[in-house]
Amino acid sequence: MKQYQIKPRQDAIELVDFTPQTLAADEIRVELKAASINYRDLVTRQVTKQSVVPFSDGSGKVIEVGANVSDFKVGDKVIGLFFPDWMDGSLNAKLFSNSRGAGNCDGMLSQQITGNADGFIKFPEYLNYQQASTLPCAGVTAWHALFEIPQPTKKGQTVLIQGTGGVSVFAIQLAAAFGLNSIVISSSDEKLEQAKALGATHTINYVETPDWDQAALAITNGIGVDIVLEVGGAGTLEKSLNALKVNGVISLIGILTGIEGKINPFPILTKSLRVFGIYVASKAMQSRFHQALTEHQIIPVISKTFEFEQADDAYLYQKSAKHFGKIVITNNP
Ligand SMILES: NC(=O)c1ccc[n+]([C@@H]2O[C@H](COP(=O)([O-])OP(=O)(O)OC[C@H]3O[C@@H](n4cnc5c(N)ncnc54)[C@H](OP(=O)(O)O)[C@@H]3O)[C@@H](O)[C@H]2O)c1
């Protein structure tokens, strides 16, 4: 049996043999079928100080069930939760400290995964393993950012979506399914065409139009957008604040441009903006996300797939940012 482990402080992974642990009464064992990579996995690989199995996201088939487990049976198709202990309610420090693929919580890039049954959930039946492997981090984060915030986005409102990576492409699909107007910004005209094909209402190339905040204001007749899905972080936040209407919302998700920058907080005050920090999701949110996917028959967009042995290539491809949507690794033992 093989699994990847991050080599501490080396920005490297290695494929190692391992012997699966004995199954406890409240655990299930899952045979990995597919795993998907997130931007976070690039960062974790660079900074991790201890050996850990990488990747928060993976799907597989249940092959063994502990004596006390009633929610699953052998053969069930499941995904692992990003936060295996966060069932419902608000995130707290204890739940926050245990996320798959980082710290001392092994992730999903392993041919078998064993863990407490609560940390898994069945995925919608119409999806295959590869598609399902994209749901635990990117998919449900987009769902949370749009619909699980205190001021959930409503039909007819306008969302500004930054980029066309994993989280953002799910947001484009959810926006189209739920009747939101979307303004998608990307560095690539080709990706913007793909966004339009998925239902994006308006598109802006942020390289050709660096003042995309002004362009978004123009599209909304000077009123501003209702919500921004902020994946850029410090380098884009100021423009996002400009692009918002009075009482608008920022769902703060990512830090692609880094964590240091000068932010003028004045628009937050004058426009009564709300900034919500989003950190993936609870099991309850994941479940509601699955219901929404099923209702709208949304198919996750996979840009490229790699074999289990090609995990390093998947990291490189994620780093290149050539992808539109998700990158998936398959396990065909
Ligand atoms: N808080 C959470 O729960 C959570 C969950 C998932 C991800 N995240 C974070 O969200 C961010 C995105 O994650 P991901 O996995 O979706 O990343 P990803 O798939 O690697 O997406 C990268 C894309 O972001 C776009 N981008 C980069 N710089 C940009 C900029 N200055 N302005 C607008 N778009 C820009 C680019 O799109 P184009 O190529 O189209 O230009 C790029 O291809 C990361 O910071 C990640 O850590 C947070």
Image (cartoon, rainbow, N blue to C red):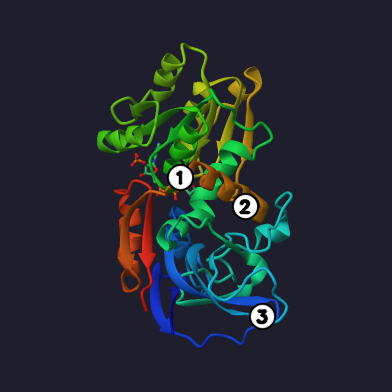
Q: Quadrant of residue 95?
A: bottom right
Q: Earlier in the sequence, mark 1 or mark 2?
A: 2
Instruction: List x then y, in percent, for residue 243.
Output: 49, 22
Q: Residue drawn 44% across and 85% down?
A: 1
Work out whether 12 lies above or below 156.
below
Q: Would you say residue 187 is visible in this rendering?
A: no
Distance from disc 1 to disc 2, alpha carbons, whole Å, reads 15 Å
In the image, taking residue 265 as reference, residue 168 lies left or right, namely left
Q: Residue drawn 54% across and 65% down?
A: 78
Q: Amino acid at mark 2?
A: Ser
Q: Which residue is mark 2?
A: 287
Distance from disc 1 to disc 3, alpha carbons, whole Å, reads 33 Å
Dot 1: element: loop
Q: Which residue is mark 1?
A: 298
Instruction: List x then y, in percent, for residue 164.
Output: 38, 41
Q: Which residue is mark 3?
A: 66
Q: Residue drawn 59% across and 43% down?
A: 144
Q: Amino acid at mark 3?
A: Gly
Mark 2 within 8 Å of ligand 1, using the beta carbon: no
